[in-house]
Image (cartoon, rainbow, N blue to C red):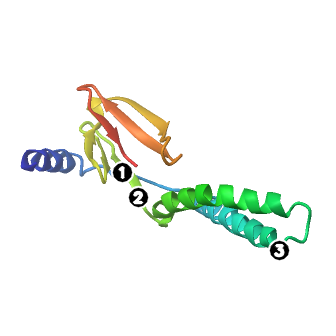
């Protein structure tokens, strides 16, 4: 582990002369994701409340829909909450001859990158930035 830290410091110090490019989330997307996840959750709760009143022929549909979809939207809302931290830096790109990509998962030299993909995680339906290097290491940055 100490060996990795020494390597990271070496790459970082060689690239300090360049201004880093900081990648952050869009404020518009923060608002849209918050409104969508919390809005659907509130809508499901309202469906359950109106379904329990039994004042319509469709009350059972309201109740059933609310009960079926509430756990799903609660799950999606809880997975999205950590991503709604405003100003959170996703990654930094330090350009140059010895350029690196720096994230909370580590530092990756740009020379070693084979491909960068955006992959949807089937468990939480959130896109991950996946970097594959020439020495067959795979880094999931988010």
Image side of residue 89 versus residue 56, left or right: left
> How far is mark 1 from mark 3, CA to CA?
53 Å
Please state which of residues 81 and 105 is positioned toward the viewer in this rendering: 81
Give the number of the disc on residue 89.
2
Describe the element under mark 1 as helix, strand or loop: strand
Q: Is residue 128 above or below residue 89?
A: above
Q: Position of residue 51 (x, y in %)?
A: 80, 67
Check disc 3 and report the residue beneath it: 53
Residue under the image location 90 percent in, 71 percent down = 55
Q: Is residue 38 left or right of residue 89?
A: right
| Mark positioned earlier in the residue sequence (3 or 2) | 3
Residue 137: quadrant of the picture: top left
Looking at the rendered image, the disc whose residue lies closer to the viewer, 1 or 3, is 3
Relative to 47, is 32 on the left or the right? left
Residue holding disc 1: 92
- Residue 120: x, y in percent? 50, 39
Select label 2 or label 1 by which is in front.
2
Number of the label disc, if any, that sits on residue 115: none
Tag 3's secondary structure? helix
The Cα–Cα distance between marks 3 and 2, rounded to whole angstroms, is 46 Å
The percent position of residue 4, horizontal first and vertical second, equals 13, 45
Q: Are marks 2 and 1 in contact (CB under 8 Å)?
A: yes
Q: Secondary structure at mark 2?
A: strand
Crowding around mark 1 (Cα neighbors within 10 Å: few <14, some 14 to 19, many 20+) is some
């Amino acid at each position: 582990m100490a060996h990795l830290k020494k390597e990271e410091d070496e790459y970082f110090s060689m690239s300090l002369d360049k201004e880093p490019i900081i990648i952050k989330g869009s404020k518009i997307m923060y608002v849209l994701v918050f409104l969508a996840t919390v809005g659907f959750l509130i809508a499901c709760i309202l469906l359950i409340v109106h379904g329990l009143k039994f004042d319509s022929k469709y009350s059972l549909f309201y109740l059933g829909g609310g009960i079926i979809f509430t756990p799903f939207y609660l799950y999606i809302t809880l997975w999205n909450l950590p991503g709604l931290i405003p100003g959170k830096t996703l990654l930094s790109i330090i350009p140059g001859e010895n350029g690196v990509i720096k994230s909370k998962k580590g530092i990756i030299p740009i020379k070693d990158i084979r491909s960068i993909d955006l992959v949807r995680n089937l468990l939480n339906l959130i896109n991950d930035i996946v970097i594959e290097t020439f020495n067959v290491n795979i880094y999931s940055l988010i």
